[in-house]
Image (cartoon, helix red, strand yellow):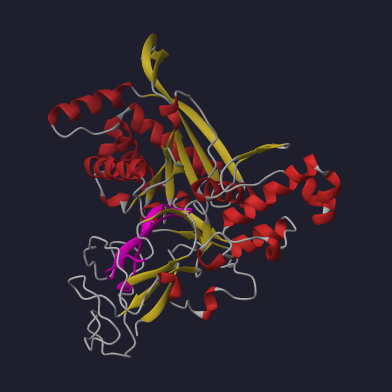
Amino acid sequence: MPQVLEFKLPDLGEGLTEAEIVRWLVEVGDVVAIDQPVVEVETAKAMVEVPCPYGGVVTARFGEEGGELPVGAPLLTVAVGTAEPSGTMTGSGSGAGPASGAAAGAEPSGSGNVLVGYGTGAPPVRRRRVRPEGLSAPAAVPAPAAVAPGPVAVVSPLVRKLARQHDLDLRQVAGSGPDGLILRADVESAIRSVPAAASTSPMSAASSAPSSQAVRPAVTAGASTGPAGERIPLRGVRGAVADKLARSRREIPDATCWVDADATELMAARAAMNGAGPKVSVLALLARICTAALARYPELNSTVDMEAREIVRLPEVHLGFAAQTERGLVVPVVRDAQTRNAESVGAEIARLTEAARTGSLTPADLTGGTFTLNNYGVFGVDGSTPIINHPEAAMLGVGRIVPKPWVHEGELAVRRVVQLSLTFDHRVCDGGTAGGFLRYVADCVEQPAVLLRTL
């Protein structure tokens, strides 16, 4: 007999506690190989494919596309020891050993893989829909007892929570999932039906549900429209951004200083560099200027440990840069930026930007930053007061570079001007340090030769 193993949503790192199912890559009855991606999920950090550490036949899936699952919740079950490498199935009475190579009755081993790119890296196989002997239908394979605790057929804690929030008795809900499993869509449908019943037959609605349900607007997995207006769930990337920005404002006593700078010479230097070799972006040049400034003012490359009441100055500069994508604002991180020249920084920024655009950034690409560079000038604005990317200590904001009247060498001229703003944690330094940092950045923008002193 095949052994049914439960694969739970793994810990995706960086303190993530839940993920949204974007797309299932396998269906019940498919044969999967060890480390084959089985589902695409979106966390608060990135979009990732989750590989299954077991090889066998998928007997059950838990969670619908668009729904959320907490880390540790059942993701799917796999009947192990049923598939030969060629794809033929081994029946319970055939006498052949399991495809995994494990002896009959032995504990199957998985890869231990958590995310694509880690673990054994076995190439995925083309999925095959099969009905192996001994498994007349996937639903006939008993799921582990932990999958459906209690008398109500509900797997997801999020479904139970949603029902509790709306005083909904799950015993009165018919499940549309396998074996009557109650899905999030079933609960949402039941919630929506309560206001509808109240509008057509107030007396019957009052007798069958608590009165508080009759006035609650519908809440769905996506945005919904109700009496209180459009409701958009704060989850995924948008929810993570909201949490981080709120925490920054709550915990960090920030202050902002700014200065206008003549960027004409910087733009001329960039044009000369691009004429002599690979093209270098303005953002790459500003990133290199930032690392030079942080070497002079290391207070701003730090974090605050309030439990120990210590300022922790960090030896490496992991430079984050804000990138707007279709999924929302993300901050990819250039590792060890202090060791890179402008060309190397630019190449890494380009790689991370493309990954952000395609939604292929990993959690590691989005965490561990020590200082952030925010080029909001791409939106056509001059200035801003950035919110610090907690738990960092500072962020440099850069506005658009535009021709403006400017006094140059004692005469009025049209020059390329940019506004620079620095938001900093006032716990790590005073205004003199912050002003010194910003003035050095402005000097490098106005006279790029100043940067040669640090090279």
At a point 49% along the width and 48% down the height, the residue shown is 237
Quadrant that contains the N terminus:
bottom left
Q: Is residue 110 visible?
A: yes
In the image as oriented, which residue stretches furthest toward the top?
412
- 200 or 424, which is in the foreground? 200
At a point 36% along the width and 46% down the height, the residue shown is 359
Residue 287 covered by magenta stretch: no
Quadrant that contains the C terminus:
top left
Residue 50 covered by magenta stretch: yes
Q: Position of residue 366 (x, y in %)?
A: 40, 52
Q: Is residue 393 above or below residue 114?
A: above
In the image, is 68 to the left or to the right of 289?
right
- 162 or 43, which is in the foreground? 162
In the image as oriented, which residue stretches furthest toward the left?
276
At a point 54% along the width and 58% down the height, the residue shown is 304
Q: Position of residue 342 (x, y in %)?
A: 25, 40
Q: Is residue 130 above or below residue 404?
A: below
In the image, is 253 to the left or to the right of 71?
right
Q: Can residue 306 be seen in this view?
A: no
Quadrant in which residue 345 is drawn:
top left
**Number of callouts:** 0
- 233 or 363, which is in the foreground? 233
Which portion, as a residue range, is magenta?
Answer: 29-56
Q: Position of residue 275 (x, y in %)?
A: 15, 26
Q: Position of residue 258 (x, y in %)?
A: 51, 31
In the image, is 284 to the left or to the right of 424?
left
